[in-house]
Image (cartoon, grey):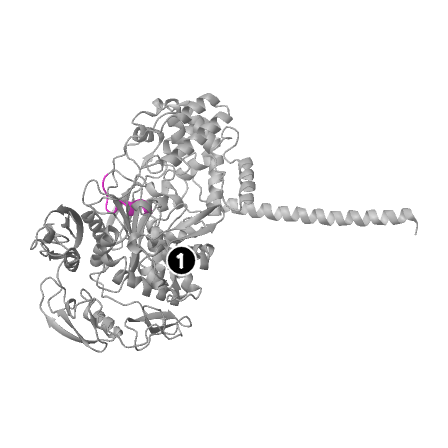
Amino acid sequence: MSRARRRRIVRKRRGRFLRIISLGVFFTFLTLFLAAAGILASCAKDLPRLESQTAPEAAQTTKIYAADGSLIANLYAEQNRVIVSLSEIPKSLQDAVITIEDQRFYKHKGVDFEAIARAAIINLKRGKIVEGASTITQQYVKNTFITPEKTLRRKIKEAVLAYQVEKKYSKKTILEKYLNTIYFGHGCYGIETAAETFFGKKARDLNLPECALLAGLIKSPSYYSPHTNPDKAKARRDLVLKKMAELGFITAEEAAAAQAAPIQVQEIKEKPIRAPYFVEYVKQILIDKYGANAVFKGGMRVFTTLDLKMQAYAEEAAWSTLNRPEDPSAAIVAIDPKTGYIKVIVGGRDFNTQKFNLAVQGRRQAGSSFKTFVLATAIEDGISPNKVYQSTPLTIRLPGKDWRVRNATEGSGGPPMTLREGTIKSVNAVFARLIMEVGAKNVVSIAKKMGITSPLDPNPAIALGGLKIGVSPLEMASAYGTLANHGVHCKPSGILKITDSKGKVLEENKVDEKMAINPMTAYVVTDILQDVIKYGTGRRANIQRPAAGKTGTTQNYRDAWFIGYTPDLAASVWVGYPQGQIEMKNVHGIRVVGGSFPAQIWAKFMYKALEDTPPSRFPVPESEVVRVKVCKDSGLLASIYCPNLVTRTFVRGTEPTKLCNIHTAPQRVIVPNVVGLTAEEAKTILTEVGFKVNQVDEVYPGVPKGEVFNQKPKERTKAEPGSTVTISVSAGEPVSQKTTVPNVLGIEEHEAIRSIDRAGLLAIVSYEKTSISSENGRVIKQNPLGGTTVDRGSNVSIRVARHEGS
């Protein structure tokens, strides 16, 4: 075959192949075109006819309900909205809005395909949605004509309507309508209402910095609010000014001068609503998900998890404790650990004067309350709570800087101690050594799984609550709830169901749960944290039912925490000053630590919140844990000669196997203090130590039924193992929240404090010099006086004599 003929055959085959490819491409595009046309035709059936439509449907009020069905809030747009013409809106405001929302507003026909392509590339590079491409026309259509659901069908409708709007109205008319309908936050619709609400002036009188601020609010009115997030509001305003200069709307000098201007907005006065911080939390979730237009005009029905009784108890607990004008503030969050449903949010003292939600938005240093996550990591890794650690201060060499660890006064250590004891006493040096053993990255991982959502830096200092950003009370309540729920974390939620105005369900939330840690880990940690309340830093959180928790106090007493839980409810309490890191060294005459006001507030709240819930014990995963009698001194298996026997719970396989050999001969045993415990708890403790118990029931005013009010022999005396300890148990009815102040005048300081503590009161101690040696160490003044009836948990101030020569 000749070469020329071969070339002709190759060209013919190539042409046939290209025709096949061309037909394939043609039919593919034809299929896609017909599919798109079909979708457009389907969407076009129910599109509004703009040429005959004069006004959107009337706005309807959105209603928010508590868990019991009670209406707690109405959300609606301002009814006295003033429509203004574009000529009454400053050119600077028009330019600012176009700059930050739609730079190609005057070039596109309703949909900006160039912006869509640019946003797609940026989002693809970032791996997430960081930039949108909705035009001003599309935003106007979405706020005016379209329902709030986020679907492809809705987006197509929005684009088609935007094109119709562009054909019907001029660009100036579209901009005017947009500025009169857009939401600026705090219930403000339209630029005129926003100008009056934020600055107390007409829109036409706004200056350049004010115009830039309002333009910046449009993207996220809650996030950039100058009332709740002034720093973010300023940064957003300055970005608008910078871009205006780049586009030539203003000069660089004008931008710099406007950026230097302080943000000054007037106070917003709103009608008081029930549980305002909870409502605000829910409202922001709704706006972020459905848009402000749907929330304030869509007539939604929002059914929440709020428990109004618990909310009232929480507010009463906080403000009856911190009851003076100069007192710090508090935040409380309570969650059902089995569901993640938020029952209570107290975000501050007064929503009208402080709209920043300390419970949700506030992120503060956690102090020792973060040790719980280190402990959980250790137990998860198989470390026994009976493992012994040195408790002396230490310096740990880290890259760049040494980490010097000292112990707090309330948990100062010296001798070696078990991990359990180090947790109960909250000994910093023990946990510094522990985190170096388990690894900071592993602690961060466990904390995240348990419910902490704030960014965490894997620095060993997190063992003592040294966090880069801090954590919120909502996160802490959620994370501790994981322990109450056997290691299963339920994502916190404040909303049960949302419907539209006609009853159609838009959203119905179900429990979102994940296994975070092993159930046996959760139980062992809980077992240790119960001892924190019984014997450790959290004694003032004792609510006479099974409960576990941990205190937290940050450097220089700037933040104080107590986070605790029962099988039915988890709650976190934070106490501090919202305006900054201010030391709390003299509040009601004391230094505020986690075991003082936070534990006291927690106990007051939980006592009332659970009064109709029968007490229940934390269930034991019997197949995974074992209980062993150990020597409290050595942490090893107890011998018959150990004077201090205790029963401890261990993850199976981590229990001690060696027998204690530090006690080799019979010796007298120290009688533990069981006054203030229930009869059953007292019997358990005394029996474990080796004593027999004789119970005597007596009517004893002021002591709840079943509680030990006296014992013989007295605590801290020594007695032979096997001898009998007689406990006097109250046979009276449970007392109310009222109690009688004991008379402690003339008795020694430690006895006075113990007497006040037994009465359910808080002793505030001060000292006064005296020349009378016989008064040294004894109470010489008290307020209120003995015999006075007060609320349980109230303060009793006592002055103790200090002899000048002592």
Q: Is residue 140 above or below residue 568?
A: above
Q: Quadrant of residue 682?
A: bottom left
Taking the view exactly as shown, the residue that stands out farthest to the right is 2
Which residue is at the far left? 787
Compared to residue 213, the image places residue 625 above or below, namely below
- Residue situated in front as seen by the camera: 27 or 404: 404
Q: Is residue 256 visible?
A: yes
Q: Is residue 707 left or right of residue 595?
A: left
Name the kind of residue labelled 1 in the image: Val
> In percent of the image, x 39 and y 30: which residue is there?
213
Q: Position of residue 206 (x, y in %)?
A: 36, 24
| Nearer to me, 727 or 702 | 727
Q: Residue furthest front?
A: 805
**Relative to residue 521, is residue 20 drawn left or right?**
right
Q: Which residue is label 1 attached to? A: 374
Q: Nearer the viewer, residue 639 or 142?
A: 639
Q: Is residue 800 left or right of residue 252?
A: left
Kindly indicate the quadrant of the structure image that contains residue 254: top left
Query: In the picture, residue 86 is in which quadrant?
Result: top left
Count the numbered circles shown: 1
* SS state under label 1: helix
x and y percent of residue 276 in the render?
26, 45
Query: Where's residue 216, x and y in %?
Result: 41, 33
Per the rendered image, the range of residues in magenta is 271-282
Give percent across and percent down for residue 391.
36, 58
Crowd rating for badge 1 (residues with CA inside 10 Å; few <14, some 14–19, many 20+): many
Residue at the location (49% across, 30% down)?
105
Question: Taking the image as drawn, is residue 568 in sight?
Answer: no
Magenta stretch: includes residue 791: no
Where is 407 relative to 356, above or below? below
